[in-house]
């Protein structure tokens, strides 16, 4: 079992709450992703800390007491809609999967998920960011992310054998939802990868940090921010915007939405359809009505 952060300091004293090992074991047994395990563990220990501070025994806590915790979290902590949903799931997981209790419906409205449009870069902005990234490893990493529509976690888990130069494919293993998929390998990026390999000679991971450890997400995010500043791209974007830009630019150049869905690894076409709201297809052919006014 991996070592996840399982202890939460109280606000009132120096004691600690320990998340039950059975909770972690069950999450791993059911093959939840590492990121989900971290989130569930964090949220459940928050709940355990609340119970301890209010002298509640976790295994005998009542339904109204759980509902009171949600009310407390929403009002006092002002948690977001997504965090509220994840908290519900983390607590239900303990009582239903770990303790084997019946499915419980709490008297609490699950908030609607806020739908936000993905933030994308123009092709010119992507080009400017990549051109100012001079370090060979950093440039190859950013180019690979954009060219294949990878999440940062997927990029960092790549091994040398995941690059199939014969079929021009990249194997993405254990992606979000524990799914494997393939995505496209750019000929230009393949040449960059070969040049990069000659210099860095990675052993275990395709991109490695010191002593052949897995390269860190924080480091490549810093690289992206520095390159954005150097390229004078002053948008409030994250590294994930390269994946959004990959999908949007493919759509704008006529790639079928179903193919984009497969390349991104989306379960539902509805998830991929959000890119139709940020593409400029057709919009550049529409003239604003104010342009027809001559006396403004």
Image (spheres, rainbow, N blue to C red):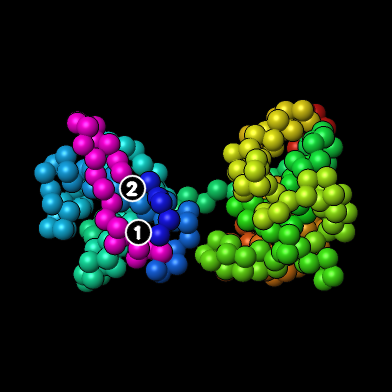
Q: Which numbered disc flags the more N-terminal residue, 1 or 2?
A: 2
Q: Secondary structure at mark 1?
A: helix
The answer to whether any part of residue 233 appears in the image is: no
Mark 2, residue position: 6
**Quadrant that contains the C terminus:** top right
Mark 1: few/some/many CA within 10 Å (<14, 14-19, 20+): many
Give the magenta part as a residue range: 7-28
The relative height of residue 293 versus residue 258 in the rendered view (above or below) is: above
Q: Between marks 1 and 2, how big is the CA–CA gap?
A: 9 Å
State yes or no: residue 62 in magenta.
Answer: no
State yes or no: residue 18 in magenta.
Answer: yes
Q: Position of residue 7 (x, y in %)?
A: 31, 44
**Quadrant that contains the N terminus:** bottom left
Q: Nearer the viewer, residue 160 or 220?
A: 160
- Which residue occupies 29% across, 62% down? 22
The relative height of residue 69 versus residue 275 in the rendered view (above or below) is: above
- Which residue occupies 24% across, 36% down? 10
Circles 1 and 2: CB atoms closer than 8 Å = yes
Q: Nearer the viewer, residue 154 or 63?
A: 154
């Amino acid at each position: 079992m991996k070592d996840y952060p399982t202890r939460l300091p109280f606000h009132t004293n120096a004691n600690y709450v320990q998340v039950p090992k059975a909770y972690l074991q069950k999450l791993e047994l059911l093959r939840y992703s590492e990121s989900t395990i971290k989130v569930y563990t964090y949220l459940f220990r928050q709940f355990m800390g609340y119970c301890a501070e209010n002298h509640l025994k976790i295994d005998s806590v009542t339904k109204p007491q759980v509902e009171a915790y949600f009310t407390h979290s929403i009002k006092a902590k002002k948690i977001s809609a997504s965090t509220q949903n994840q908290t519900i799931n983390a607590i239900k997981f303990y009582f239903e999967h770990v303790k084997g209790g019946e499915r419980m419906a709490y008297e609490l409205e699950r908030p609607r998920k806020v739908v936000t449009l993905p933030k994308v870069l123009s092709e010119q902005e992507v080009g400017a960011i990549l051109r100012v990234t001079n370090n060979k490893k950093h440039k190859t990493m950013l180019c690979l992310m954009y060219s294949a529509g990878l999440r940062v976690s997927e990029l960092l888990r790549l091994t040398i054998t995941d690059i199939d130069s014969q079929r021009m494919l990249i194997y993405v293993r254990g992606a979000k939802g524990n799914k494997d998929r393939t995505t496209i390998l750019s000929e230009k990026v393949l040449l960059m990868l070969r040049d990069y390999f000659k210099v860095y000679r990675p052993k275990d991971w395709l991109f490695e940090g010191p002593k052949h450890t897995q390269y860190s997400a924080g480091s490549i995010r810093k690289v992206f921010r520095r390159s954005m500043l150097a390229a004078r791209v002053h948008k409030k974007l994250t590294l994930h915007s390269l994946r959004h830009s990959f999908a949007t630019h493919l759509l704008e150049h006529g790639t079928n939405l179903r193919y984009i869905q497969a390349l991104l690894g989306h379960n539902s076409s509805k998830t991929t359809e959000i890119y139709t709201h940020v593409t400029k297809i057709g919009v550049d052919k529409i003239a604003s009505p104010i342009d027809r006014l001559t006396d403004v």
